[in-house]
Amino acid sequence: MTKHPFAYFLQKLRHGHQTLFHRRLRADPDTIRKVLIDLRHDCADLAADLLARLELVLAEIMNNMAEHGRAQADGSLLPSYIHLCVFDHPKGVACILGDNGQILPPTCLIRSDLTLGEPLAEGGFGWFIIRETTRSLCYFRGKRRNYLTFVIPQTSDSAQTPTKAQFSADCKR
Amino acid sequence: MKLMVEECQGQLRITVQERRLDAANASRFRDLLRPKVNHPGPPVMIDLSAVDFIDSSGLGAVVAIKKAMDPGRDISLYGLSSQVSRVFQLTRMDRVFTLIPAIKNGAYGER
């Protein structure tokens, strides 16, 4: 692959469909919030339910990226930078996100059910929401960057039978 | 973080005066409210009418508040928008919390 991986996936996935939203941002909760508010404004033409599911999934993914920034030699973390593109897709909207944070554990993409045991868990909902709300969820790692691609279906009913997520440790596809 | 906490009609009513309950403010929300509920007292009702977005961080904060409560106290959530309800239903937390939909005349807990 000679192209930058983000450009490669964008070209491969977009197939000439219209770009709806495009940002490069620092991965911190305040910046992510501002970008999601911009998303609501810029994508206001989308169906309200589709836009709501898109906003939720992007919040979960980007805040996860913010929690797993660039690891330094002393064990501290520097914020990563996120590249986000949302574009029109025949089945809803498609997204690609890249960041330069830590590698994503493959277990994040494995479908599993939630258990409501005692004591109640205060976390662990984020990846469950992502898996349940997206279709065609794929992860790639390349050039020390993470890439996630997925589709948010037009209706929430069509997310009830999600496709199996894919994990690839490199981009040579 | 804008909150209003008042005892009213036999409830501790917590009104969240924020549009979003997300990773940017969930910790603050949790830390402000835990000391208000971690002792015996009347049932707690959290009014989320003003909230139009919640993510898993916000949800986790609400769960943390429930867990901090004295075991004998009840908690209910009022005025959930469809976007907020979606997160509780998706994560099955609608089985854990009493969810009261918003009603137009502004009365609490009545249909």
Image: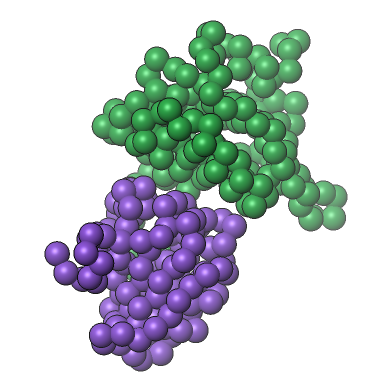
Check the image and report above or below for A135 versus B74.
above
Check the image and report above or below for A152 versus A31.
above
Q: Position of residue A93 (x, y in %)?
A: 45, 24
Q: Position of residue B19 (x, y in %)?
A: 47, 57
Check the image and report above or below for A103 versus A172.
below
Q: Residue at x 35, y 91 (%)?
A: B40
Mark count: 0
- Residue with the most extreme right position: A73
Q: Residue at x 49, y 56 (%)?
A: B20
Q: With A156 as the anchor, is A54 left or right in this view?
A: right
Q: Position of residue B71 (x, y in %)?
A: 33, 83
Residue A169 visible to an observer of this rendering: no
Check the image and report above or below for A87 versus B110.
above
Q: Residue at x 57, y 39 (%)?
A: A38
- Residue with the most extreme front position: B105
Q: Is residue A103 or residue B20 the one in the foreground?
A: B20
Residue A3 visible to an observer of this rendering: yes
Q: Quadrant of residue A168?
A: top right
* Picture quarter with the C terminus of chain B: bottom left
- Residue with the most extreme top position: A16
* Picture quarter with the N terminus of chain B: bottom right
Colour mapping used in the image: by chain
Q: Residue at x 48, y 79 (%)?
A: B34
- Residue with the most extreme left position: B111
Q: Position of residue B31 (x, y in %)?
A: 55, 75
Chain letter for the purple colouring in the rendering: B
Q: Quadrant of residue A89?
A: top left
Q: Is residue B17 or residue A98 the one in the foreground?
A: B17
Chain letter for the green colouring in the rendering: A
